[in-house]
Image: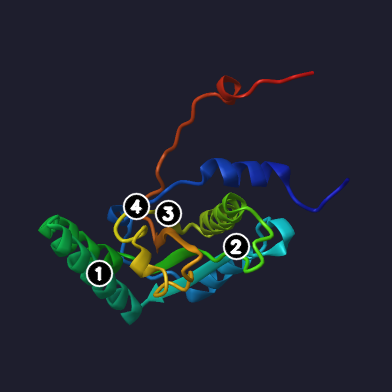
Amino acid sequence: METSFSPAALNKLIQNRRSVYTNMFTGEKVDDAIIEQMLENANWAPTHALTEPWRFKVFTGNGLQQLANYQSGLYRQKAEAEGTFSDSTFGKLQEKPLQCSHIISIGMQRDPKGKVPEIEEVEAVACAVQNMYLTATAYGVGCYWGSGGITYYPEAKDFFGCGQEGKLLGFLYIGMPAKWPVGNRKPIADKVEWVR
């Protein structure tokens, strides 16, 4: 089948996708139109039974401070109750959002009919995030998917629109990179077995 897409351009895009961390961001703001395109492309990820389980919440501007306050406050509440509070962790939860242009929370909402196994819904969300990663790369925007902090706190689910049956799977931290990181991979031949 002939298409209008360039396989060479696609290969280059995929092979140049990188995780770009907050300490590599310049502080320059990313245009909302690029974020909207990232989300639109996420919406075209593969999804079994068309459940479209991805749920995203975008934080930018004053919303970044709201996110910082929410996650550091929830962390303090839980960690103090458990006797595990760390000033360092609290500080990171307060500061990291403010280093970003945008942060997108990554949620998975279960299909109410349970038509699809949960793992397949998580996999669909991961495909959606990969679409966002690739779109960001095409625009020269840096991002990374982080799952630390309050990601797995059940109390956080409602705030991020996951519902109690869903899951919060982390956050996509977005900003303009000062430089593009160099990547490396071991040969694919070490990870594949062909059966003919």
Q: Is residue 129 visible?
A: yes
Compare residues 99 and 147 and report the one nearer the observer.
147
Closest to the camera, between mark 3 and mark 4, is: 3
Instruction: Tell me which label, 3 or 4, sits earlier in the chain.
Output: 4
Q: In the rendered image, which residue does mark 2 sit on?
A: 42
Look at 71% across and 20% down and name the residue there: 194
**Amino acid type indicated by mark 3:** Trp
| Label 2 – label 1 distance at C-alpha | 28 Å
Q: In the rendered image, which residue does mark 4 sit on?
A: 21
Closest to the camera, between mark 2 and mark 1, is: 1
Q: Return the x and y of residue 59 as percentages of the image width and height.
A: 39, 74
| Label 3 – label 2 distance at C-alpha | 14 Å
Q: SS of the residue at dot 2?
A: helix
Q: SS of the residue at dot 4?
A: loop
Q: SS of the residue at dot 3?
A: strand
Compare residues 112 and 131 and report the one nearer the observer.
112
Q: Residues within 10 Å of mark 4 (few under 14, many from 20)?
A: some
Quick one: which residue is furthest to the front in this view? 113
Look at 59% across and 47% down and name the residue there: 13
Instruction: Tell me which label, 4 or 1, sits earlier in the chain.
Output: 4
Q: Are marks 1 and 3 in contact (CB under 8 Å)?
A: no
Q: In the rendered image, which residue does mark 3 sit on?
A: 145
Q: In the rendered image, which residue does mark 1 sit on?
A: 74
Q: SS of the residue at dot 1?
A: helix
Q: Return the x and y of residue 178 as percentages of the image width and height.
A: 34, 54
